[in-house]
Image (cartoon, grey):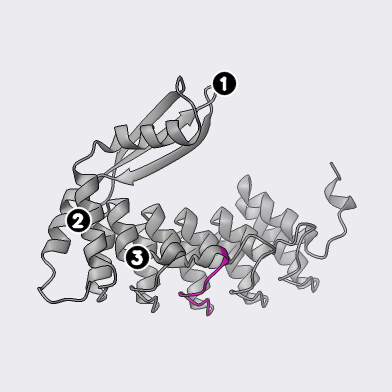
Amino acid sequence: MDSPGDRTAPGAPLHDAVLLSLGDPEAAARELTVLLERGLDPDGPDEDGLTPLYAAAVQGAADLVRLLLAAGAAPDRPSGTEGLPLCAAAVWGHLAVVRELLAAGARPDAREEFDLTPLAWAVRGGHVEVVEALLDAGADPDLPGAGEESPLCAAADRGSPAIVRALLGRGAVAGRAQALATARRWSALDVEAELTARLRAAHSAPGAAFSVRRTLGADGTERVEVWLLGSDGAARSGDSRDAGHAEVVRLLEAVRPGASA
């Protein structure tokens, strides 16, 4: 592997500084500040075409994102084949980064590869506060994501009453009938058993071991995470849902008659 000093891509030094945030955020901020003051391009890609802003967004390094934006980094610039910084932050639920990017002018309805939007990523991940921040910034609550799936349908599949409430509160109507059918189907299932069966089938692992983690969200909804374990006991693949499908059914059934489906 090349040492950092051997790397010649324009953004390599900035990327090295951003990576410091994983172990020493304060040192990362100092190093990044020095490099930007020297005039390095805040959008300079590394050898793989990734921008420093995207790398900082993935890591949830809001202070570094703020420094890069202040130095002129473009908030909506795609990063190689990876996509948009706002989508990267939304995937991982990095609320502070999402807010920094939106304040700098990132478009809440921007699309990246496979037609995914920041809202679609946030809904899929069950990141309620990120969903709310995007909606507050003007994200279209009915804008479909991949496969023409509406945000309501994705939220119903996720099993998140809080996200469904947020979408309905912003006037979401697209796909309501399908969302209701999806929530009803999930409400009749054992979430842990269903996720385990899906992982087992997807990875052809009849004798595999699984790990299950249950947590409670701020609204009291249980989150169920199921992980497929490798022979070394490390997690190989996983899936999760919020077990609030019955409440989602109630919310969608309460939508006034005649609302568009």
Q: Earlier in the sequence, mark 2 or mark 3?
A: 3
Q: Considering the image in quadrants, where does the N terminus appear? A: top right
Residue where numbered disc 2 is placed = 248
Residue where numbered disc 1 is placed: 232
Considering depth in this image, is 162 or 112 the residue closer to the camera?
Answer: 112
Query: Which range of residues does the magenta coloring cover?
Result: 105-113
In the image, residue 258 lies at what x, y percent? 12, 77
Q: What percent of the width, then of the height, locates residue 236?
A: 53, 33
Q: Amino acid at mark 2?
A: Val
Depth check, front residue: 20 or 160: 160
Are the residues tagged 2 and 3 within 8 Å (C-beta)? no
Mark 3 lies on a secondary structure that is helix
Callout 2: SS = helix
Magenta stretch containing residue 164, yes or no? no
Regarding residue 255, the answer to whether it shows in the image is yes
Circle 1 — which element? Answer: loop
Quadrant showing the C terminus: bottom left
Question: Between tags 3 and 1, which lies in front?
Answer: 3
Residue 151 bears which disc, if any? Answer: 3
- Name the quadrant containing residue 197: top left
Q: Would you say the magenta stretch is mainly helix, strand or loop? A: loop
Amino acid type, label 1: Asp
Q: Quadrant of residue 182?
A: bottom left
Residue shown at 37%/38% (left/top)?
225
Sequence-first tag of 3 and 1? 3
Separation of disc 1 and disc 2 at Cα?
38 Å
> Where is residue 199 shown, x and y percent of the image?
43, 35
Q: How many marks?
A: 3
